[in-house]
């Protein structure tokens, strides 16, 4: 039965729509402004008069970023890093979450292990102990130093764990009656039902891995192992247009500036996430909320 809305309901809906539109515009403005600065003339970009449209259209900032082989080498390193972290990290999360989703009668030490992992994941040993540990393990200037620290994510494990805890208990009972073991349950029962939450943690992994740059600064010296984010970050840090050698490499000051280079860097690094997010967004809300309410 359809009820007609009262004047108060319509005013309330209009107020909500107005607020959401304003929030959307405020969120979109920095993105459009950054893109506009990246395509603007460096002299105009430094004046602070650009809003959401470029002034003095120029592609020199993008040409400076793209016009060397190191950019594509770093891009390939980032893609490899994301692929391996996504595959291995999802497997670790999936396998670790399964025993924690069991009842205490099946896994007596479950709560103790959960508390241990919670405490360990809440503290960081620091850069110097991490560097010494990586050196002792032979991981300096090693591609795996960019992957191994991010395979175990306790937050993702809790997300999958809560997702499974919300599934009907009858699934376990029926599978036990049919003689299904843990591996059969993982591959044939839980995996098809876990696609929403797996898509959610995949989105988290992709975004975090793509945006991470500090790990390579500390542990990587080989430019052939440098991720794209680290490479683009160092472009802005190392180029000084007032020095003759940097003018020869980066172009004259009138063609490119640190401000336009920084805007081009940010714009380029947004593109992969903007392409990937729409495909995973439909799983996001379902995967993040299922398991949050207990009956």
Image (tube, rainbow, N blue to C red):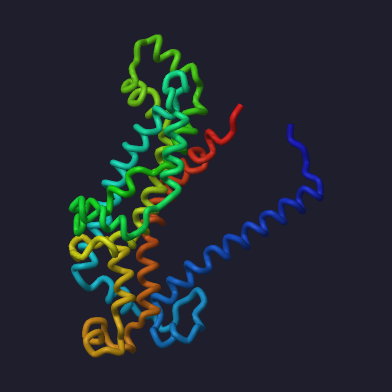
Estimate the x, y position of residue 73 in percent, counting from the top left.
Answer: 20, 62
Residue 95 position (above or below residue 72): above
Question: In this view of the protein, can residue 233 be seen by the observer?
Answer: yes
In this rendering, would 200 be left or right of 135? right
Question: In this view of the protein, can residue 200 be seen by the observer?
Answer: no
Identified at 47% across, 22% down, the residue is 103
Identified at 81% across, 50% down, the residue is 7
Estimate the x, y position of residue 271 in percent, counting from the top left.
Answer: 37, 60
The residue nearer to you, when weighing 50 against 223, is: 223
In this rendering, would 30 be left or right of 58? right
Tally the numbered discs: 0
In the picture, residue 233 is in which quadrant? bottom left
The residue nearer to you, when weighing 134 against 178, is: 134
Estimate the x, y position of residue 287 in percent, counting from the top left.
Answer: 48, 38
Please identify the quadrant where the C terminus is shown.
top right
The residue nearer to you, when weighing 161 against 83, is: 161
Residue 223 position (above or below residue 108): below
In the picture, residue 153 is in which quadrant? top left
Identified at 23% across, 51% down, the residue is 144
Residue 154 position (above or below residue 52): above
Residue 53 position (above or below residue 127): below
Please identify the quadrant where the N terminus is shown.
top right
The residue nearer to you, when weighing 289 against 24, is: 289
Estimate the x, y position of residue 53 in percent, counting from the top left.
Answer: 48, 76
In this rendering, would 200 be left or right of 187? right
Q: Residue furthest top?
A: 177
């Amino acid at each position: 039965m359809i009820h007609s809305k009262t004047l108060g309901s319509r005013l309330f809906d209009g107020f909500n729509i107005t607020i959401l539109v304003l929030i959307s515009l405020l969120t979109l403005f920095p993105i459009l402004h950054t893109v506009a600065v990246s395509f603007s003339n460096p002299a105009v970009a430094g004046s602070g008069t650009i809003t959401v449209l470029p002034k003095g259209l120029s592609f020199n900032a993008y040409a400076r970023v793209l016009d060397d082989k190191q950019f594509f080498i770093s891009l390939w390193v980032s893609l490899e890093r994301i692929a391996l972290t996504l595959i291995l990290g999802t497997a670790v999360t999936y396998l670790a979450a399964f025993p924690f989703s069991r009842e205490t009668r099946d896994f007596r030490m479950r709560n103790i292990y959960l508390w241990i992992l919670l405490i360990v994941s809440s503290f960081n040993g620091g850069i110097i102990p991490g560097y010494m540990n990586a050196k002792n393990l032979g991981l300096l200037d090693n591609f795996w130093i960019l992957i191994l620290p991010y395979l175990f994510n306790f937050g993702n494990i809790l997300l999958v764990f809560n997702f499974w805890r919300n599934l009907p208990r009858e699934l376990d009972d029926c599978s036990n009656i049919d003689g299904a073991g843990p591996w059969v349950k993982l591959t044939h029962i839980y995996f098809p039902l876990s696609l929403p939450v797996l898509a959610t943690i995949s989105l988290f992994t992709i975004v975090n891995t793509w945006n991470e740059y500090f790990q390579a600064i500390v542990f990587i010296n080989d430019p052939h192992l440098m991720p794209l984010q680290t490479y683009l970050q160092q472009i802005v840090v190392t180029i000084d247009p007032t020095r003759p050698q940097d003018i020869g490499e980066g172009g004259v000051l009138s063609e490119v500036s640190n401000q336009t280079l920084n805007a081009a860097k940010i714009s380029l690094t947004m593109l992969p996430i903007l392409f990937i997010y729409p495909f995973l967004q439909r799983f996001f809300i379902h995967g993040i909320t299922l398991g949050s309410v207990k009956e």
